[in-house]
Amino acid sequence: MPFIEMTALKKSFGSTQVVRDFELSLGKGEFVSLLGPSGCGKTTVLRMVAGFETPDVGDIRIEGESVLRHRASQRHIGMVFQSYALFPNLTVAENVAFGLKVARAAVAETRHRVDEMLEMVGLGAMRDRYPYQLSGGQQQRVALARAIAPRPRVLLLDEPLSALDAKIRAALRSEIRTIQRQLGITTLFVTHDQEEALSMSDRIVVMNGGKAEQIGPPEAIYNRPGTRFVAEFIGSLNVIEGQIVAGDSTHLVFSGGRLDLLPNFAGLAGQSVAVAIRPQSLRFCAEEQALMRGVVRNIEFLGAFSRVHVSCGSANLLVDGFARDLSTNVTVGSPIGLTVRSDEILHLFDNK
Amino acid sequence: MIGKRFWSWTIFALAALYFLLPLVGMLEFSLRARRGAYSLDAYRNVLNDAQFHQTLGYSLILSMSTVVLGLLIVAPTAFWVQLKIPRIRPLVEFITLLPLVIPPIVIAFGYIRLYNTSSVLPLTGSARGTDLLLTAGYATLSLPYMYRAIDTGLRAIDIRTLTEAAQSLGAGWMTVLTRVVLPNISVAILSGSFLTFAIVIGEYVLAALLDRPAFGPYMVWMGSNRAYEPAALAVISFGLTWAAMAAIQFLARRGHHSVKV
C-alpha cells in the first residue's frame, strides 16, 4: 500500500484550472520532486497535501486514510517554505520547540529534541539567536529542524532553496537529502530547478499545465523523456521535427538533412514527428559523408567540455564534446557534418 | 551650499517657533498664579483637587477597557481580512474611517435613543451601563487609529506564511493568533493603544452628553471657572501624552527585531 496516495485531484481558482487529473503515489521514505515551470500547479498540489487548499475533486490518503477532512494543523505534516517563515519573535531554539510546545510535549523531552534537531542541522551554537541574526542558509536549516522536530509523517518542501545563493544551495541540497535518508521521512519537494530535482530525488514528477507529464526516476526522466515538454524542460535536449520516410530503411527528413531511425519508427511513415537528441550524442564528422550539415555559430568553453552551437537547417543544435576531441576545423563559421547513432534518438510524444 | 543650509535651518527654526511659542507661553502663564513671582501654585491647586484625581482615574480605567475592547474587535478582524478576504479591505478601511466623518454627538444621541430607560436594553439607566456605552463609543472613536496601526503591523510581516508555518506545526487559530500574530505586531498594538489612550483621556463630547465624570469635561469645567489652573492642567496632560509617545519610541526600538523579517 502506498504511504501517500493522491487520486484524480482537481483544483480551480476562479475559471483557471490549476491542477487536473493529478495522480501520484509515494512509498514510505521516498523523496519525490514535483518539477515544472511556475504556474504548472506543483505548489498547489503541495498545498493541498498540507491542507492549505482543498481539492475540488479527488482524494488524498496518507497511510490509507483520507486527510481531506482534517485541517492543516491536524495532519502531522511538516513544511518548509521558500521564505523560511521563522517566527521573528522567537529564538532559534524556541522556533524549533514551537511544534512540540503546541503538542504539549514534556519540557525535558522538548529540550532534548530541540538539542538533537539543532545538532542535526549543525546550529547548536546558535540556539539563543534570533532569526534576523542568521544568514539565509542558517534560517532555512532552522526551518528544516523546526518542521522535523514534532516527528511529522510527511515532509513538504516548497522551493526551500530558491532564495539562497548558488553555493549554499548546493550544500544545503545534499544536507537535506542526507537528513531525509537518515530519518526515512517521506518527502514531497517542489522545485522549478531541474538540477535540484535530478540530484535529490528518488522519483521526479514533471508537471505541465496542472498535469503530470511524466513520472519516473531521475535517470529515466533525463535519458528517456516521454514528451516534448519534458525533453525541452529537462536539460538542454535538441528537439528536431520532421517527416518520417520509410523505405529500405527509415529516415526522418528535416530542413537540415536526415536522420537514420530504428525500424520501429517505420509504422509512422508519412507522419510528422518530433525526436530528441542529447547534446553529447551528436558527433562531428567530415561534411561530405554526413547526413546532416550545418554551420558552427558559437563555441562555449565550459571547463570539462565545450558546447558547440550549430545551425542545421531551421534547427539550432547543441553539440557537447570534450575539448580534446573537437578537431581543429570546428571553428565559428565553418561548415560541419553531424552524425548520431540511431539508438540515441528519442521519440517524443505531444501530450495534449 | 551655505545658502541652502541657511534656508533649511531658517525654515526649521520658524516651524519650531510656530509649535513651541504657544507652549512656552502656556507654561509661562501657568507659573504666574502668584502675583509678581513665578510659582507652582496652579499645579499645586490642580494636584490637590480631589476631582482631578477622580476624573483622571475614571478616564484611565475607561481608556484601558477601551484599549481591550478595541483590540478584541480590531486585531482578529484585521488578521482575518488580511489572510482570508483581502478583497474587502477597502470596505473595512472605509468603515473604520467613518468615526472621523460622523461627529461623536451623533453617536451620543444614537446611544441615548437606542438604550434609554424605556428601551429594551436600558443601559443609560445605570452608571455601569452608561460606562459600557461610553467604552463602546470610545472604541468607535479610536477605530481609525487602532485599525490603521494594526493593519500596518500585519503588513510588515509575512502573516500568511507565518500562519501556515504555525498551522503545519499543529497550531489552531487561537494559538496562531496569540503565539504568532500578536507577539509579532506588539509594537503596532502598543502604538494603537497609546493613540486610543490619548483620545480617551481628552474626549469631551461623549462623556459630557452621557454625563459621566471623565477627565475631558473636568478640563473644560476648569477652563471656564479658573484662570491659571487650566494652563497647568494642559501642561500636565501634554506631559502625559509625551510620556506615552516616548514609551512607544522606546518599546519600538527595543522590539525592533520583532518587526524585521
Image (cartoon, rainbow, N blue to C red):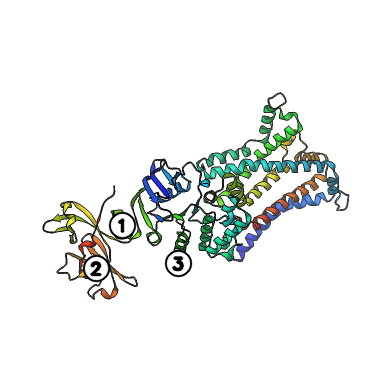
Q: Which residue is mark 3?
A: A167
Q: Is residue A296 left or right of residue B204?
A: left
The answer for how far apart the CA atoms under marks 1 and 3 are is: 26 Å
Kindly identify the amino acid type of the residue bearing the numbered disc 1.
Glu
Residue A217 is tagged as: none
The answer for how far apart the CA atoms under marks 2 and 3 are is: 33 Å
Which sits in the foreground, A203 or B101? A203
Q: Which residue is mark 2?
A: A296
How would you rate the neighbour count of disc 3 (Cα within 10 Å): few for under 14, some for 14-19, many for 20 or more?
A: few
- Residue B209 visible somewhere in the drawing: no
How would you rate the neighbour count of disc 1 (Cα within 10 Å): few for under 14, some for 14-19, many for 20 or more?
A: some
**x, y (%) of residue B209?**
73, 33
For the point 75% across and 51% down, which residue is it?
A: B239
Residue A232 is tagged as: 1
Identify whether A141 is placed above or below B199: below
Sequence-first disc among 1 and 3: 3
Which sits in the foreground, B78 or A43? A43
The answer for how far apart the CA atoms under marks 1 and 2 are is: 22 Å
